[in-house]
Amino acid sequence: MKHWFEGLVNTARIECRYTRRHPQQWVICALLPVMWLLFVANTFGTGLMTKLPVGLVNEDGGPLARELVMVLDAVPSLGLRGFETATEAEAALSRAETYGTIVIPRDFTKDSLNGRGSTLELIINKSYYAVGTILEVDVKTALAAVMKSAGTIRMTAARGGSLKAESNNLRIASPEVYFLGNTGFNFSAYLLPTLIPGLIALAAGLTFSGVLVREWRDGGATRLLAAANDFASAAILGKLLPWFVFYVVLGLCWVFGLTGVLGWTAAGSVGVWIGATVMLIAAMAAIAILFTAVSLSWPIAVSALICFAAPSFPFTGFSYPLESMTPGAAFFGQLLPLTHYLAVQGECWILNSPLDHVFTRLAPLALLIVVPMAAGLPILGVRLRAWSSKDPEKDRIRTLLVKESLITDETQGGAR
């Protein structure tokens, strides 16, 4: 076991020296991922949608219509642009100058106060899913407030009571809605907790894959095995160790950045969240080992990792629930480490779920480490030895290493 750990440390040192001597390695595997993460983290600004251009046509002009316009104008997400006719507003929408159109029809005030009801026309470009959803929610909320006002006036006139009493009667039917962890529909808090861990996992997987295929592509398996005391598993894991540590640190920067720098305090266990982050990186390493072990060529190994990890976001349940997916899509989602990591992150960050329940979420993530590692590591070890056997300088390298070992032993013996 001592020799195995010595081999692990030796190959980790070799990887560090290789990275130091080859700037393109640390630029591609370290600098570019960090720059990309910083770019994404600063993309959304405050995270709040404000003053989205929306066309408004007021064909009524009555007091209730004017009240609705004032309420809509006070909504932060809406930047109202007035048009004389619905045709002009729809033309602006078709030219993508606005995200939607609101048309207040004629007799809106009269029909609403008489109890006959009136239809407000809302046209939204839903190809912009997030924008369309926010606009729909905000406009309907504003309309509900105005309709409540109209209902209060109508009930007061019918019953002969007071406006305050009838307002309280209507309030009974008003729901109280709470949004855990993101009360203000802040899109930074919605998107970054998925995008940043996903990008870290993707970058880690690509780095692990590129490091693993290097001896396959460029040769050098003999020297690597010799440095690892002929332990293939130590050679493989030692190569990955420096990058594993780097991406774990990057993941921890994310956890502490979200809960500390950005101020989104965790409601649950940060320690479990950190453990899940380490497991996410370990799972990507295990999957990279498996894909490298079973691929027919090194380009296929790297491409397989890309095809597996790059399109992961839609299958994690982030934008579309797993329960609504087809069985095949849902099954693929369960194979993604990011799916289980996001579940643990949400339970530790927002829900403060019981630890025994959180640990059940960690179990699939642990399986995605153990199973690929157990299957891929022995196979990749065999293939590493096969690459070594084809090394044209195998015998010369072995001879040099033996001589170095003898010289070292003699020097140490003389010193003793």
Image (cartoon, helix red, strand yellow):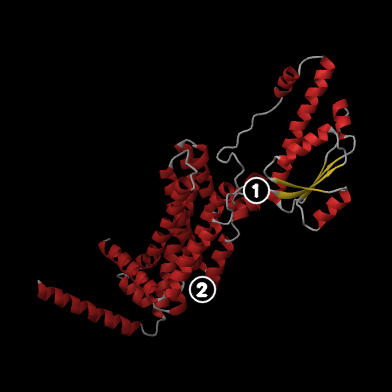
x%, y% of residue 112?
85, 30
Residue 329 in view in this figure: yes
- Give the CA separation, mark 1 to mark 2: 45 Å
Would you name the residue on which mark 2 appears? 298
Which kind of residue does numbered mark 2 sit on?
Trp
Can residue 290 be seen by looking at this rendering?
Answer: no
Q: Position of residue 357 (x, y in %)?
A: 49, 38
Residue drawn where x is 77% and y is 27% of the image: 149
Question: Would residue 342 appear left or right of 256 to someone viewing this image?
Answer: right
- The 10 Å Cα crowd at callout 1, few under 14, some 14 to 19, many 20 or more, is some
SS for dot 1: loop
Nearest the viewer among 274 and 108 is 108
Nearer the observer, 411 or 106: 106
Q: Which residue is mark 1?
A: 49
Image depth: mark 1 or mark 2 in front: 1
Disc 2 crowd, CA 10 A, few/some/many (<14, 14-19, 20+): many
Q: Is 29 situated above or below 184? A: below
Q: Quadrant of the C terminus?
A: bottom left
The first of marks 1 and 2 along the sequence is 1
User: Quarter-wise, where is residue 95 in the image?
Assistant: bottom right
Q: Is residue 394 left or right of residue 341?
A: left
Residue at the location (86% across, 52% down)?
88
Report the residue at 37% width, 73% height from top: 20
Are dots 1 and 2 in contact, CB under 8 Å?
A: no
Which element carries disc 2, helix, strand or loop?
A: helix
- Is 84 drawn above or below residue 291 in the view shown? above
Give the amino acid type for the residue marked by disc 1 in the picture.
Met
Residue at 41%, 44% in the rendered image: 271
Residue 283 rendering spot, x and y as whole percentages: 47, 56
| 413 lies left or right of 110 | left
Q: Which image quarter: residue 244?
A: bottom left
